Image: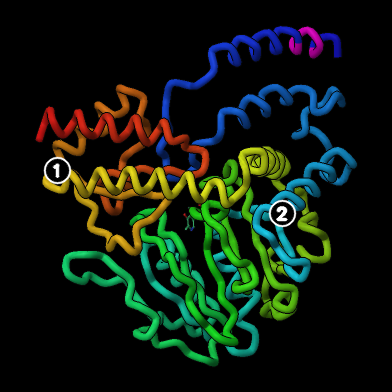
C-alpha cells in the first residue's frame, strides 16, 4: 500500500508532465489494432494503479464485484445510447475476436434450415464463408467484380438470394481492400447479419434493420480482446446441438456475458472510448468528421491520378480504410519509409494486397489526414 502511494505521486507528476507535452508526435494509420484517442490513453494511465479511489486497478477487481459491474453496465448503456439499440436486442461482450463470430453465427443461426447466404466482398467475407461451411450449406450470392476498371459490388438485383436461407451475412466494410457499402441489403424476412468490425460507430446505422451485428473492438472502439455482438432476442435459441457452451448466444444472454471471466480490461477500455465518443458529440458528429477526412484523402488521390491510384468504385470507397497504390514497388517502399520518418506510421497495405492503406478510424484527428495529404504532395513532387 505504502509503496503504491509513493508510486502514485511519481506517476501523477509524470502524468502532468505528459499532459503539458500533449500530443504524441506520431499519427498511427494502422488497420487493427488501430489508433486510440490520446485522451482515452491518458485516462487509462491516470486510473491504472487506483481505479476510482479503490486503491486497486480495474483489471485487478473481481469481474462479479460492484466495481467492474459498474464498468460493464455503463459501457453497455453508452453503446445502446450511441447506436440507439432497442430493448429487444441483447448486447454481448465476448472474447475470441470477430473470428469467433464466423463460427458462432452459423452455429447459433443455421437452425433447422441448415443453409445460409453470404456476400463475398473480400478477405474477411471469405474467412466468414470458409468457417460457416463447417456447419451447413453455404451459398455465395454475390461477389465483387471489376467493371470499367473499377472494383465494385453488383447491385442487389443481380444477387441470387434464397428466401429459405437462415440468414444473409455480409461485411459492410472490407478492412483489407477498402470496400464499403453505402446501402443496406434488402432481405425481406431473411435475418440480416453484418460483420461491422471496421465501421461500427463510424456512421449512423439503423440497428432494427439487422438481426445480428458483430464487431471486434480493436478497429474503431478500443483494444483487442473483446467483441461486441448485438442480436435480436428471438434469434438466440436455435444453437446446433454440439455447440460449445461458450459459443451459445443463449448462455451469454442468461449470464449477461459473465458465463466465464470476461476480458475485463478490454471491456473497460471500450467504456472509455465510448464515453469519449459521447463527449465529442456521438456517432453523427463522427460521421461528419469521417466524411470530411475521407473526402480530403480520396480527393487528393484522384487529383494526382498519374501518381496515386485508388481503383475502388467511388460509390464503394471506404470511409475507414483508404487503399491506394503508387507507380511501382520500389516507390511504395520509399513512401512507407519516408512517411514513417515524419511520424506517419503503419501505412503499409495488407500483405495480401500490397500498396498503401491509411486507416482513418474515429480516433484519427483531421490533422492526421492533413499531415498525410501534405506528405503525399511533397512525395509526388519529389519522385513524380
Ligand atoms: C479485423 C477483422 C476481423 C477479424 O478480427 P479478429 O479480432 O482478428 O478476430 C474480422 N472482420 C473484419 C471486417 C475485420 O476488420
Residue beneath disc 2: 81
In this image, 88 relative to 226: left or right?
right
Q: Position of residue 3 (x, y in %)?
A: 80, 10
Q: Nearer the viewer, residue 206 or 171?
A: 206
Q: Ligand 1 closer than 8 Å to the CB at disc 1?
A: no
Query: Badge 2: how crowded within 10 Å, few (<14), some, or many (20+)?
Result: some
Tell me if residue 69 is in the magenta stretch.
Answer: no
In this image, 296 relative to 137: left or right?
left
Residue beneath disc 1: 307
Q: Ligand 1 closer than 8 Å to the CB at disc 2?
A: no
Q: Quadrant of the C terminus?
A: top left
Q: Nearer the viewer, residue 134 or 258?
A: 258
Q: Position of residue 71 (x, y in %)?
A: 79, 42
Dot 2 falls on a residue whose secondary structure is: helix
Could you say which quadrant of the image residue 159 lies in? bottom left
Which tag, 1 or 2, sits closer to the chain's start?
2
Residue at figure coordinates x 59%, y 51% from the top left: 283
Q: Position of residue 90 (x, y in %)?
A: 74, 65
Dot 1 falls on a residue whose secondary structure is: loop
Residue furthest out toward the bottom: 164
Write the start and end of the magenta stretch as one range.
4-8
Magenta residues: mostly which secondary structure? helix
Q: Quadrant of the N terminus?
A: top right
Residue at figure coordinates x 63%, y 49% from the top left: 226
Q: Does residue 162 appear anywhere in the picture?
A: yes
Residue at figure coordinates x 48%, y 44% from the top left: 289
Query: Badge 1: how crowded within 10 Å, few (<14), some, or many (20+)?
Result: some
Amino acid at each position: 500500500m505504502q509503496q503504491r502511494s509513493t508510486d502514485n505521486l511519481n506517476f501523477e507528476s509524470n502524468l502532468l508532465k505528459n499532459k503539458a507535452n500533449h500530443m504524441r508526435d506520431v499519427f498511427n494509420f494502422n488497420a487493427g489494432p488501430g489508433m486510440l484517442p490520446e485522451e482515452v490513453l491518458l485516462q487509462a494511465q491516470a486510473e491504472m494503479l487506483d481505479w476510482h479511489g479503490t486503491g486497486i486497478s480495474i483489471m485487478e477487481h473481481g469481474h462479479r464485484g460492484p466495481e467492474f459491474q459498474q464498468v460493464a453496465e455503463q459501457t453497455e448503456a453508452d453503446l445502446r445510447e450511441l447506436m440507439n439499440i432497442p430493448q429487444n436486442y441483447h448486447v454481448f461482450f465476448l472474447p475470441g475476436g470477430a473470428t469467433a463470430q464466423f463460427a458462432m453465427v452459423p452455429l447459433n443461426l443455421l437452425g433447422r434450415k441448415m443453409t445460409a447466404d453470404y456476400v463475398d466482398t473480400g478477405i474477411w467475407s471469405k474467412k466468414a464463408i470458409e468457417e460457416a461451411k463447417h456447419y451447413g450449406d453455404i451459398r455465395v450470392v454475390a461477389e465483387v467484380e471489376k467493371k470499367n476498371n473499377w472494383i465494385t459490388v453488383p447491385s442487389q438485383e443481380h444477387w441470387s438470394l434464397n428466401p429459405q436461407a437462415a440468414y444473409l451475412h455480409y461485411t459492410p466494410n472490407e478492412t483489407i481492400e477498402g470496400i464499403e457499402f453505402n446501402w443496406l441489403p434488402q432481405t425481406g424476412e431473411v435475418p440480416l447479419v453484418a460483420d461491422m468490425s471496421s465501421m461500427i460507430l463510424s456512421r449512423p446505422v439503423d440497428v432494427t434493420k439487422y438481426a445480428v451485428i458483430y464487431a471486434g473492438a480493436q478497429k474503431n472502439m478500443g483494444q483487442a480482446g473483446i467483441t461486441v455482438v448485438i442480436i435480436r432476442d428471438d434469434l438466440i435459441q436455435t444453437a446446433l446441438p454440439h455447440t460449445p457452451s461458450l459459443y451459445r448466444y443463449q448462455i451469454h444472454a442468461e449470464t449477461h456475458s459473465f458465463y466465464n471471466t470476461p476480458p475485463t480490461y478490454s471491456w473497460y477500455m471500450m467504456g472509455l472510448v465510448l464515453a469519449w465518443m459521447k463527449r465529442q458529440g456521438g456517432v453523427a458528429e463522427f460521421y461528419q468528421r469521417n466524411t470530411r477526412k475521407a473526402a480530403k484523402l480520396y480527393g487528393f488521390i484522384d487529383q494526382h491520378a498519374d501518381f496515386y491510384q485508388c481503383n475502388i468504385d467511388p460509390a464503394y470507397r471506404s470511409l475507414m480504410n483508404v487503399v491506394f497504390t503508387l507507380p511501382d514497388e520500389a516507390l511504395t517502399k520509399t513512401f512507407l519509409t519516408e512517411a514513417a520518418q515524419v511520424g506517419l506510421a503503419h501505412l503499409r497495405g495488407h500483405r495480401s494486397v500490397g500498396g498503401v492503406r491509411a486507416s482513418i478510424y474515429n480516433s484519427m484527428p483531421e490533422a492526421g489526414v492533413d499531415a498525410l495529404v501534405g506528405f503525399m504532395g511533397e512525395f509526388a513532387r519529389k519522385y513524380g
